[in-house]
Amino acid sequence: MYGTKSKIDLAFEYQSQAAILRPSIHSRRANLTVKFQDLYGFTVEGNVDDVNVLNDVREKVRQQGRVWWALEASKGANWYLHTTIGQGSALTSSLKFSALANAITLKKLIRKGIPPVLRPKVWFSLSGAAKKKSTVPESYYDDLTKAVEGMITPATRQIDHDLPRTFPGHAWLDTPEGHAALRRVLVAYSFRDSDVGYCQGLNYVAALLLLVMKTEEDAFWMLAVLLENVLVSDCYTNNLSGCHVEQRVFKDLLSKKCPRIATHLEALEFDVSLVTTEWFLCLFSKSLPSETTLRVWDVIFYEGAKVIFNVALAIFKMKEDQILLTHHVGEVINVLHMTTHHLFDPDDLLTVAFDKIGSMTTNTISKQRKKQEPEVMKELDQRIRRLNSLKMDDK
């Protein structure tokens, strides 16, 4: 199976990968394309410069791991859970000061990345998944999967269709065992929330959750908290109304944060949803390298869905000069695709996302959503009416 790895296993894996990633003199001279597997079993293809970046990233991960383990030793194994300051504005007690200090430390640490070995535990606690799981019987997931076994619905048929297309070639996901585990998680959730059922994009999200969380049950609860508490509602319902709202909000933010890019794209008649729909529905899992995606998820699970906008804006911002030189829609898509494909250093992306784009409060994003919702619903309603009218004409 995808298995639980000990800290010793991970240490050996890092060491072995470091050796693989060091290009030979001949490959440096020839600038050959190299392929190798990353920490989560994905085949990575890049040039020698990408390999050098990945070596640097590996070292940063090791250094960040040492910081986390030092805090675990000094503050206690679950120190990051003690970040709630409580009611009252006056910070008079040492406990409240400690909680505030922990909260400030934790936010900075998470933006720098959670070590892979600690990721499952930290995500499960901080996202609210552990709390959500605690509200139901211990056997909830097992009972649910057994109850729906063999049942066929439109959702299960679509899931079966998408399984072979979910990260094809992956060492574990693209196997009968991997397909079966992913299917159980997706089918179980489709019965838990019939309004969502299943939507394309969730297969990639759930697959990556499986690789990180190591168990189906934990991946299921992470998917549940993501869809029910972290992301905006209706993102994955039949009409994708929530996703359409997010596209509108992003377009407004692009005009405010990157006005030159927005003006240029408007002149090219470039619709940002051509690229951002996949980013938002798959949470960048199909676009960014796995460790970069998971660094983004580290922050999403702690700070919320507003982070998606920061990251999407940062991708555009990082290539502003190149985008401004484009002359047609295809060139823009190519620039953005090449950018995401080679974003092997998460710090490059997140530095732009939070330092150059600037902070956006949840309240600000909520106001933008409420402003866009009526127009989106009106357009969707008009679309449905046109389709119904066409059907009547066919009859």
Image: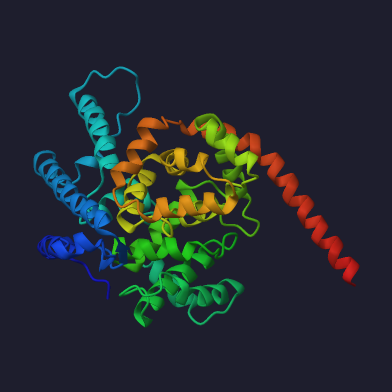
Question: In the drawing, does residue 389 fall left or right of residue 80?
Answer: right
Q: Position of residue 84 (x, y in %)?
A: 30, 33
Q: Is residue 343 above or below residue 211?
A: above
How many marks on residues?
A: 0
User: The C terminus lies in which quarter of the figure?
Assistant: bottom right
Q: Look at the image and name its color scheme.
A: rainbow
- Of 44 and 234, nearer the camera is 44
Q: Is residue 105 above or below residue 157?
A: above
Q: Is residue 69 above or below residue 286?
A: above
- Of 140 and 366, nearer the camera is 366
Residue drawn at x 33%, y 58% as measured from the top left: 290
Quarter of the figure with residue 394: bottom right
Let me know if residue 206 appears in the view: yes
Question: In the drawing, does residue 151 fall left or right of residue 296?
Answer: right
Question: In the drawing, does residue 49 fall left or right of residue 372?
Answer: left
User: The N terminus lies in which quarter of the figure?
Assistant: bottom left
Q: Is residue 316 above or below residue 54?
A: above
Work out which residue is located at the far front of the displayed protein and give it. 29
Q: Position of residue 181 (x, y in %)?
A: 38, 74
Let me know if residue 138 appears in the view: no
Quarter of the figure with residue 44: bottom left
- Of 30 and 306, nearer the camera is 30
Residue drawn at x 63%, y 39% as measured from the top left: 266
Q: Position of residue 113 (x, y in %)?
A: 26, 45
- Of 8 and 26, nearer the camera is 26
Q: Position of residue 334 (x, y in %)?
A: 49, 54
Question: In the drawing, does residue 277 fall left or right of residue 143?
Answer: right
